Image (cartoon, rainbow, N blue to C red):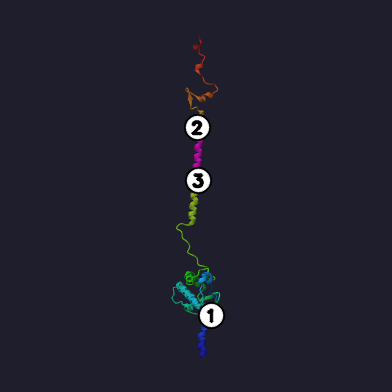
Amino acid sequence: MLAGVLLLIFLPPLVAKDLCKDSQDGFKVRLSIKTGLGDDAYEWNESEMFLFRSTLAYAMRKHSNQDTYTIDNILVCNDTQRVSFVFVVTSTDDPDQLIPKEQVELAVRQNKHRINNAFLLSDMTLEFMGIPPTLSAPIIYDTEPWLIVFGVVIGAVAVGIVALLMSTVSKKRRAKEKAAGLSEEDEGIVKENGTALSSLGRKEGVYNQAFSNDDRFTKL
């Protein structure tokens, strides 16, 4: 009778240890308390482990929306003095059945900041091996950055095209004005004594009446 009672007392912890050690659904946890807190580092003991199991039970409750998870569903094994250990989560309906690793990972990721805060640590000093560090929520812009860059580039190209067109038109205008000025000089716009100065360049010359060989002025 006594042997049966002792077996009932010690058998569940032994079975739980075997579930944790032999399971593929467990996660290794590593805490770097001294690195994270320096001189304010605290000692890891059974009370801290109780807090860890409590925070994991809380995370499972939040993820599953079930209030039936307790610290008894969080099994811990392979713990070392360097503050590392392995944990698994058992089903609330069947203590011999483990919660799949994927569900535990989702629960941890969704509540990692609460777990970190409970131990005054960060993702770098409280590591769940196999679970990537939590990332801050991505920034959502009202306008996509690539669209802003595209608009700036298109605007610069448009300004460049307009500047090139204006420069071309200005050059053509100056060329026309210069050509018109040369044409006016050739036409002899400036005149002296009613005779165009440009006519001085003609081969036949200019007929000057003052020096005409008029018989009326040369006869005695």
- Closer mark to the observer between disc 3 and disc 2: 2
The secondary structure type at the circle numbered 3 is helix
Chief secondary structure of the magenta span? Answer: helix
Which numbered disc covers residue 17?
1
- Who is closer to the viewer here, 143 or 192? 192
Rendered view: 213 above or below 157:
above
**Image coords of residue 115 (percent x, y):** 48, 71
Real-space Cα distance between discs 3 and 1? Answer: 76 Å
Q: Residues within 10 Å of mark 1 (few under 14, many from 20)?
A: some
Q: Earlier in the sequence, mark 1 or mark 2?
A: 1
Amino acid at pointer 2:
Gly
* Residue depicted at 51% across the width and 87% down the height: 6
- Who is closer to the viewer here, 120 or 51? 120
Is 3 in the magenta? no
* Residue depicted at 50% across the width and 85% down the height: 9
Amino acid at pointer 1:
Lys
Is 167 in the magenta? yes
Circle 3 residue: 161
Real-space Cα distance between discs 1 and 2? Answer: 106 Å
* Residue depicted at 49% across the width and 52% down the height: 152
**Image coords of residue 20 (percent x, y):** 53, 78
Rendered view: 213 above or below 37:
above
Real-space Cα distance between discs 3 and 2? Answer: 30 Å
Circle 2 residue: 181
Q: Which residues are magenta?
A: 165-182
Q: Residues within 10 Å of mark 2 (few under 14, many from 20)?
A: few
